[in-house]
Image (tube, coloured by chain):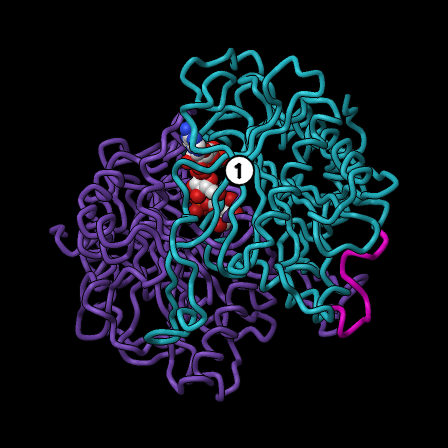
Chain colours: A purple, B cyan
Amino acid sequence: YLGASVVHSCEHGKSMAEASRISEARRDAVFARWVIFSPARSRRPTDLKSHGPANPSPGPDDGAPKPSCPFCLGRESECAPEIFRVPAPDESLPWRIRVIENLFPALRREAAPPAPEDEEPVGAGECAVRGFGFHDVVIETPHHEVRLWDLDAEGVRDVLLAYARRVQQLAEHPAVKYVQVFKNQGASAGASMAHSHSQMLGTPFVPPSVTSRLNCMKEVFERSGKCSLCAVVSKDILVSETHNFSAFVPFAASYPFEIWIVPRQHSSYFHETDQDKVLDLAGLLKSMLQKLCKQLNDPPFNYMIHSAPFGLSSSCLPYTHWFLQIVPQLSVIGGFEMGSGCHINPVFPEDAAKILREIDSS
Amino acid sequence: YLGASVVHSCEHGKSMAEASRISEARRDAVFARWVIFSPARSRRPTDLKSHGPANPSPGPDDGAPKPSCPFCLGRESECAPEIFRVPAPDESLPWRIRVIENLFPALRREAAPPAPEDEEPVGAGECAVRGFGFHDVVIETPHHEVRLWDLDAEGVRDVLLAYARRVQQLAEHPAVKYVQVFKNQGASAGASMAHSHSQMLGTPFVPPSVTSRLNCMKEVFERSGKCSLCAVVSKDILVSETHNFSAFVPFAASYPFEIWIVPRQHSSYFHETDQDKVLDLAGLLKSMLQKLCKQLNDPPFNYMIHSAPFGLSSSCLPYTHWFLQIVPQLSVIGGFEMGSGCHINPVFPEDAAKILREIDSS
Ligand SMILES: Nc1ncnc2c1ncn2[C@@H]1O[C@H](COP(=O)(O)OP(=O)(O)O[C@H]2O[C@H](CO)[C@@H](O)[C@H](O)[C@H]2O)[C@@H](O)[C@H]1O
Ligand SMILES: Nc1ncnc2c1ncn2[C@@H]1O[C@H](COP(=O)(O)OP(=O)(O)O[C@H]2O[C@H](CO)[C@@H](O)[C@H](O)[C@H]2O)[C@@H](O)[C@H]1O
């Protein structure tokens, strides 16, 4: 059951979606996940309180500087240690971005890195390693009320460059196998802190979705000789394109209004993107977030950067292609999705893309 | 950030969990998923409105018969067609359980089943098939206010037998590859209808999590000669055991207080379980739901039956072992989990199991 704005969007796309396509299942070529598209599902009734976003993201008006927020300017001493800061260009402020340690880390830098034999299966093929890893927070702005897409393109670029710089540092650590960069915006998207920030977790293992993504892309490459993400994006799912990046609703999007931003030139690692391209990416990311914010009434959302694990053999590089995935949180996952790994999406990608193309992003 | 009751549970388990184990990563032998256990995470602060369950399940008192509920006794005509009904033993009521078509199906029985050539990849290895399939609802009781675990063991057994009977019917259809049986209880677990019910979806493809589960269990079998789920359950994660089933918190539980109920004797298909064993399962399921309800204050939850796809070759049977997974919905998934497929669980399985063992389930 989706919020009013999405139902509205479905009505929008109705002539296309419901007339010609009742429902359809699609499997993508990146994760090999099946998704069921079923526009009629958005019309089902409910006698339970809405389980759409319980807590929409706080808007700017709701966000007067909070004296108790440790991420705000002047409260640096309440945070876990700083890793580095990005100065404001005109030095009017002591910093513009801070990368700090997470005070409640899921994995700990102090723990001893796992030894190779630790990864041997115990019991019935299970495996346990000490909780070694790096869990950092990127404070995107000193101001409590500013959202990422309120920054200018240079401001967003600097946030992305801060990610890249920190990923580069973590890539040097021999025991870190992967870094997951992600952002939670709004309580229903998991955020516990309102002040605009993102996080990254450097793990001593390659996470499950990364393994399955690589397996899927490898299989496609072996069969077709092509990288799944190098193909030209079909016009009907494209939202916007720049010189270096395409933003589109993926052919088998798991979530309504999900957007992928993909470099048009083959590239395995996000953190190797050069500065000019990062500015290009920043402009596109800002514009996509503005579109989602307008169309879906400031929805909670997550974004995730999907890059390659470190130390990949060169034979894997031709089929690994990094991208950024944006997922507005509009519905609740139910038992079907949890059990099967197959999502039910009431909005066809072509319909979502058409709506997103048509919204002005300024 | 977890609700008060879980934080309470964590405090409970503190001496064990936090003293001896700071944080740990584990990979299971069924899905090959990594999970990070980090008790300290449950103490992080928040300045956003709670994103714990926004809508706890309605309790019995909240559930006076709703004149507008189509699942209630006497309103059968407002439902999609009935597939079969289970009569009340004493015939005091026209039915005790009804299996009906879902009025807003994600997949449609009227659609033409996909032809084999439809599954050929299109474009960059993607694939699309018509939305053929079966989407049914099991109304577990004629009474709006009764919850599944309010039924006696025979009542719960009959619900499970209704699942099995419908799965058997769907297994006959040559184009149905898998049936996902699941239950959503409470709005935060995705339920749109309050009246106690479950659902099943028969799909024309093998869903992604089923494929990865089979791949993982196959690998364990090939390496060790053993089925991942035939191993004796270690005492510290066991919650309860009957003659035929074990209920335990899995070694690498993705969710706090997640419970698996597994047949002790190797068995690939849920729907082939004989009646006596189903009664045994029903008693254990009822008791686990009662325990969760008591410990976690009537949480929203999902359960899913993980069985084998139809028409599996006999060489796969030795490593496929069905089970029922119960997941209370206590926290929100964030960008880390969405991106990496790796969950962060603040409650160690040993601590959750100890707490669940100690709660009286009557
Ligand atoms: N003074 C301080 N100094 C430094 N760091 C501080 C701090 N005060 C708080 N923090 C940290 O700041 C982070 C804020 O992160 P978010 O709001 O994005 O979500 P959080 O990690 O809480 O959980 C969400 O994301 C994770 C990962 O996806 C999910 O596991 C979880 O369920 C979901 O709620 C927290 O991780 C917290 O530990
Ligand atoms: N008169 C009638 N006759 C027959 N059927 C009727 C009916 N009125 C309503 N229904 C059906 O009854 C079902 C009730 O199901 P649930 O409450 O378990 O969750 P729902 O399927 O809505 O969505 C949850 O589960 C799905 C699957 O996990 C997720 O995709 C979704 O996001 C989540 O909210 C609905 O599917 C609805 O279509």
* Camera sees residue A57: no
Image point (52%, 74%), residue name: A215
Relative to A1, A156 lies left or right: left
Q: Tell me residue B205's x, y (percent).
A: 50, 61
Relative height, residue B47 to residue A33 (above, below): above
Q: Quadrant of ligand 2?
A: top left
For mark 1, give the secondary structure.
loop
Which SS does the magenta portion mostly show?
loop
Identity, as a three-letter code, of the amino acid under mark 1: Tyr
Q: Which residues are magenta?
A: B220-232
Mark 1 C-beta to ligand 1 under 8 Å: yes
In screen coordinates, is B28 left or right of A190? right
User: Quarter of the image holding residue A189?
Assistant: top left
Q: Is residue A251 visible?
A: yes
In this rendering, would B225 be left or right of A212? right
Most foreground residue, B18 or A242 = A242
Chain designation of label 1:
B
- Residue A272 locus on image (x, y percent): 36, 77
Find disc 1 in the rendering and name its residue.
B1
**Which quadrant does the N terminus of chain A fall into?**
top left
In the image, residue B86 above or below residue B258: above
